[in-house]
Amino acid sequence: MLASALSNLRAILSSTVVAVLLALALAAPTAAATDAAAPTAKSPLIVCEKQTYALCLTAKCFVFDGVSYCKCDVKKGDSVSIPLTYKGGDVCSVNADGVGNGYMVSTFSLPKSLTKGGDQALYTCPAESSTGAYAQCDGGICFRSTQGQEFPGLGKLKGGEIVCSCPITTADPSTAKTGYQIVGPYPCEKSFFKYCKGKVANDDTGSTIYVGAPTGSARLSTKTLYGKVPPLNHCE
């Protein structure tokens, strides 16, 4: 029932939240890190404090039957997410309820690998030409039973890794108003831009895709969580 409710909420909120994120992506919002800090007029995001969560921003994913399964990192501390509010709770309370119940939620914090000296970068897939599919993992549910296990397309997971199930978005140049960003190797490798194309990154069973989000979303989430954005590695 919980999984169904979350899935329905994601579908309802998706277009609205993405629109707000796009409008605010280049702004400079601030947010105080209080317990389950509520969204403000400056940011549509909520801060979940001092929780164990899954960080999927840099994850590679395996597609099976229209769902992406992503190998994410288990983290502890403060993170940020769209609220995914429903009768009885929100993303922070759902994640808190996962403690002792075998699951956690995918939320956002900034990986050090994307900052100066790191070996990863945000690759921007332009709106006018990108046809690729990517996983949108914010709010995805992840089950602890996958830790340390083998998973199709992802290989052997370490104890600090977990598989999260995430919806898939496929870019459409005929309607897109902005591009999206995925995380790849740094220094920049031109060949990685193949994941901006549907020929390589698609929702076919057996495909490999990466976690992504509308261009600027990582900056907005970072600003909301930390109050500032350090220099990030970019590839365009």
Image: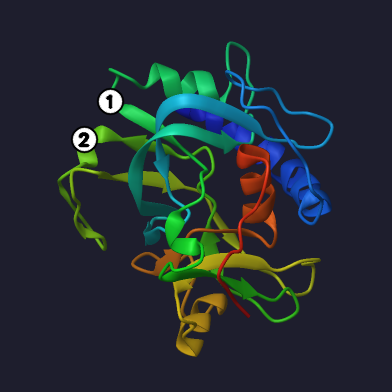
- Of residue 189 and residue 77, the one placed in the foreground of this image is 77
* Residue at the spot 40% in from the left edge and 40% down from the top edge: 54
From this view, report whether residue 146 is shown above or below residue 202: above
Tell me, yes or no, whether the two marked residues, 2 and 1, touch with CB atoms within 8 Å: yes
Q: Nearer the viewer, residue 164 or 42?
A: 42
Residue placed most toward the observer, 85 or 181: 181
Q: Position of residue 236 (x, y in %)?
A: 63, 80
Question: Is residue 114 visible to the viewer in this orientation of the structure?
Answer: yes
Q: Which mark is on residue 36?
A: none
Q: Say which residue appears at 62% left-offset and 47% top-offset.
A: 222
Query: Which residue position is annotated with label 1?
Result: 102
Label 2 is placed on what type of residue?
Answer: Ser
87 lies above or below 204: above
Residue 39: image location, x then y, percent: 73, 28
Q: Amino acid at mark 1?
A: Gly
The residue carrying pointer 2 sits among few (fewer than 14), some (14 to 19) or many (20 or more) residues within 10 Å by Cα, namely few
Task: Report which residue position mark 2 lands on.
Answer: 145
Q: Residue at horizontal 28%, vertical 25%?
A: 102
What distance separates the C-alpha of mark 2 from that of mark 1?
7 Å
In the displayed structure, does residue 149 sit left or right of residue 27?
left
Q: Is residue 221 above or below residue 130?
A: above
